[in-house]
Image: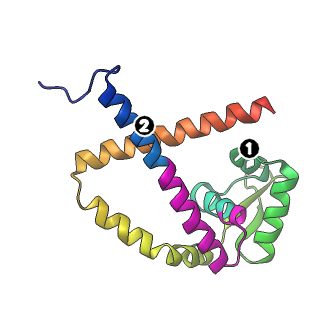
Amino acid sequence: METKVKREGSAERRHLVLEVKRSLREVRNQISLLNRQISARVDLKDIDLDVFDLISQAGPLSPTVLARRIGQHPATVTGILDRLERDGWITRERAVDDRRAVVVRAVPERNSDVLEQFAGMNAAMDAICAEYTNGELELIAGFLKKGADAGGTAAVELQSLG
């Protein structure tokens, strides 16, 4: 069976790795610009949109877990949650397993407000994904997951350095 993997030391491979890294940086930049525009359209600060998105995907979460996940001081997270709750984006509720603890949940209707703003990007991504086979999409999804995990690990390492 022929292998597609190039020798690790080859100039072509180094060029390809650099191109992947450059492309990921450009994706990050473009997504950041899109998120800023969407934040403005739904009247949220950028960080508030990021926190709302995390709560929507991973919630309900305790404020402590949320602070750890986004790498922010708990007092900063309290301010973000106060704004999100005041404007109807999240609710704070007592945890089921510990009545003294609080968890935050995204308000589902507000999630649809945000998703509506991403409609153009979602349609573009659907069109791009239609160009790939299921096997290729599995490979891409795996690569992106590993990249996200590497970013999370790097963030934790930087945070531990102070």
Q: Nearer the viewer, residue 154 or 51?
A: 154
> Would residue 16 appear left or right of 40 to someone viewing this image?
left
Between marks 1 and 2 in the image, the one whose residue lies nearer the viewer: 2
**What's under tag 2, amino acid-wise?**
Leu
Which residue is more in the foreground, 85 or 45? Answer: 45
Dominant secondary structure, magenta: helix
Q: Nearer the viewer, residue 161 or 107?
A: 161
Q: Earlier in the sequence, mark 1 or mark 2?
A: 2
Q: Which residue is mark 2?
A: 18
Marks 1/2: CA–CA distance: 31 Å
- Tell me what residue is drawn at x 59 percent, y 73 percent: 38
Q: Position of residue 30 (x, y in %)?
A: 51, 61
- Residue depicted at x 82% and y 52%: 101
Colour mapping used in the image = rainbow
From what the image shows, is residue 14 above or below residue 132? above
Q: Is residue 39 magenta?
A: yes
Amino acid type indicated by mark 1: Arg
Q: Which mark is residue 68?
A: 1
Q: Identify the residue at image location x=76%, y=78%.
A: 87
Stretch of the chain drawn in magenta: 25-49
Q: Residue at x 53, y 61 (%)?
A: 31
Q: Position of residue 144 (x, y in %)?
A: 43, 44
**121 relative position to 159: left or right:** left
Q: Quadrant of the N terminus?
A: top left
120 over 57 or under it: above or below: below
